[in-house]
Image: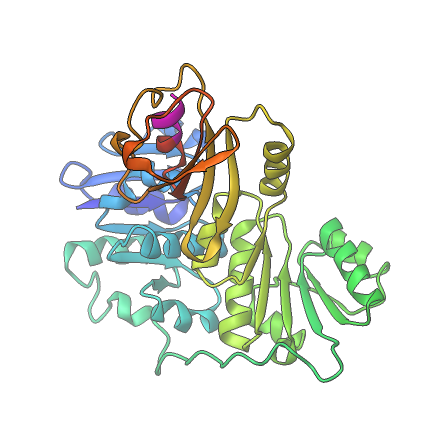
Amino acid sequence: MKIIVIGYGRVGSQFVKKIDTQAHEVVVVDRERGVLEQPDFPKGAKFLIGNAIDEDLLREAGADSADIILALTRDENSNLMIAQIARVLFNVSKVIAVVYDPQREAYFHEAGIETLAIAVAGADLLAARLAGTSGAPGLTLDAWRPSGPAAARVPLRPLETLDGSLYVIIVGGGLVGYYLARALLQTGHEVTIIERSPDTYEIVSHQVDCPVLFGDGSATAVLERAGASRANLMCAVTNHDQDNLIACQVAKYRFGIPKTIARVKNPKNETVMRRLGVDTTVSSTAIIAGVIQNELPTIPVRTLASLASCGVGIMEYHLTAVSPAVGKLARRVELPQNCPLISIVRGGEVVTSLDSTVLERGDTVLALVPQGEETLVRKILLG
């Protein structure tokens, strides 16, 4: 089997040492390079450094051909985001994630993710499961699942209110959350801020005229205290994409909050998070990059539109004398099958008869490009 282990901490390291790394293809992903310096690191395992919530890193680890992915980091929200990316983007059939909040397990089970409340026997249990045995009399992974039927999703409430005012929960009390709360309060909306950093909590709780709760904004109990069951809007604006994603998911599926907005630090996570249920994503990096592209006429590639619902964009490519596509019939350019050319702009006129048009220097080519294909299409058209 091909096994990807995310997190080489206490559980991950013991699990890898208990399985045969010669019989199985094992890839370990961890954020700390020091893991390789451990004298007992299994020689048969491959090691990658980085944050596995990045789909490109998971692809490099071989997620598209993995039999099982184990998300075993110390951060529960990272584990849940990694597990969902593995299921939704890479169709991994067996995904297990370490969690600590049992009230959130039912929803993720419905999404096809097994959860494991790790105890001392966690590594033994995982190794025994892969070996096809229980590891201990009567003990299997199912023993770690919550008893009773999975909780049904709470129906979403209408966003509109009679007087136009909204109750907004803001997760993250840093500068973004602070100024967002002030702006919403000035326009007559009700606001509650949730902040998990003690220092930030102390500061913001004395500076805004609204309730400020101390705690994890993705935790069910904290959201209950914040009155999430009557909220109209959730804005998750922490510095961590995984925390923002899980907060929005719990808000929507556990409490029925009709509209969720998440701040995204890594622009590559925008499409992923929308596919996983976040209604709106905001990436300052992507916004600034878009402004640069639109303001500088010499930029050879521009994004004209982003179709978030289907994960594609309308891209504009400016051909130069060294572009490999110059001199070829437009229909002969070997782009990926799912990346059709839309039109060519030449001398201020739009050319749509692509079958008989030879690409020339100075042409602007418009193409429909799915996320993940941008680099390849750029290479084919521009070199």
Coloration mode? rainbow
Find residue 347 and report its horizontal and vertical position in percent: 50, 28
**In magenta segment, residue 382:** yes
Instruction: Name the residue rendered at 57%, 81% in the picture.
Output: 157
Q: Nearer the viewer, residue 251 or 382?
A: 382
Q: Position of residue 263 (x, y in %)?
A: 60, 52
Part of the protein shown in magenta: 378-383
User: Is any part of residue 3 visible from this angle?
Assistant: no
Q: Residue at x 52, y 68 (%)?
A: 250
> Is residue 254 shown above or below 16?
below
* Residue sitting at x 53%, y 42%: 304
Q: Is residue 41 left or right of residue 132?
A: right
Where, by quadrant of the figure, is residue 128 drawn?
Answer: bottom left
Helix, strand or loop for the magenta stretch, by majority: helix
Give percent across and percent down for residue 259. 58, 69
Residue occupying the point 56% across, 59% down? 280
Give the camera-side residue of 196 and 176. 176
